[in-house]
Amino acid sequence: MKFTTRELVLLSVFGALWGIVEIGLGSVLHALNVPMLGSVMAALGIMIALIGRLYVPRRGATLFIGAIAMLLKLFSLGGVVLGPMVGILAEALWAEIVLSLFKRPNLVAFLLAGATAVLWTMIHPFFTGLLFYGRSLMDVWQGTLEEGSRLIGMDIQTIAFWIIGVMAAIRLVIGATVGWLSWQSGKLLRRRADLSGVNATL
């Protein structure tokens, strides 16, 4: 879909914001060894992208924002960025797919888009670990269980599937919350900015 020059500028701004958060805050939180860092970063990034979707409520807008953020991730200092870059684009893609199922942005769409994007962070290691880092599925599975065991204090051997279920539920709740916050914040920001030239009203 073609965007106007004004829309491209807006989308680029939101994409740059997501990229800056990934490069700056992401590095700090990684150094602090924050639990579920991938989900935290996905939540922050997809919130920016969803607010951007309210400013440019057209199909492809969320994916465009994610693509800009992914490109900026290349400028991260140190470490491997290929996996995170794929993650950023995948999160934007899943949100875009969900939003495209609705004729226009609404709260339900945002809740589902946020939940789906953040849930992807649980699937992401299986995809990138096998494709880019040579890790076996069992290694990724074991790492996922160990992370969940540390986070919620459950024993791996006896209740593995409960751990996975709880970890997935946490991500869904985080994502849905982000969707709600994005919807409310985006509407407030748009009213305050009183932007002209947007092709749809809320």
Image (tube, rainbow, N blue to C red):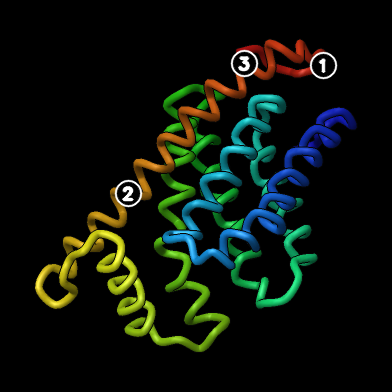
Q: Residue at x 50, y 28 (%)?
A: 181
Residue picked out by circle 2: 170
Residue 28: percent from left, percent from top: 63, 60
Which disc is residue 92 wearing? none
Residue picked out by circle 3: 188
Q: Which of 96 and 39 is in front in this view?
A: 39
Say whether residue 104 is visible: no
**Residue projecting furthest to the right:** 5
Q: In which quarter of the image is residue 15?
A: top right
Hey, what amino acid is under mark 1?
Answer: Gly
Nearest to the eye among marks 1 and 3: give it. Answer: 3
User: Going by the image, does 92 lie left or right of 124?
Assistant: right
Hey, what amino acid is under mark 2?
Answer: Ile
Residue 195: percent from left, percent from top: 79, 15
Hey, what amino acid is under mark 3?
Answer: Leu
Compared with residue 179, is residue 202 higher up or lower down, i.e. above or below? above
SS under mark 3 = helix
Residue 190: percent from left, percent from top: 69, 17
Marker count (numbered):
3
Residue 81: percent from left, percent from top: 67, 71
Nearest to the eye among marks 1 and 2: give it. Answer: 2
Looking at the image, tell me whether mark 1 or mark 3 is earlier in sequence order. Answer: 3
Residue picked out by circle 1: 197
**Around disc 1, counting alpha carbons within 10 Å, would you say few (fewer than 14), some (14 to 19), or many (20 or more)?**
few
Looking at the image, tell me whether mark 2 or mark 3 is earlier in sequence order. Answer: 2
**Around disc 2, counting alpha carbons within 10 Å, would you say few (fewer than 14), some (14 to 19), or many (20 or more)?**
some
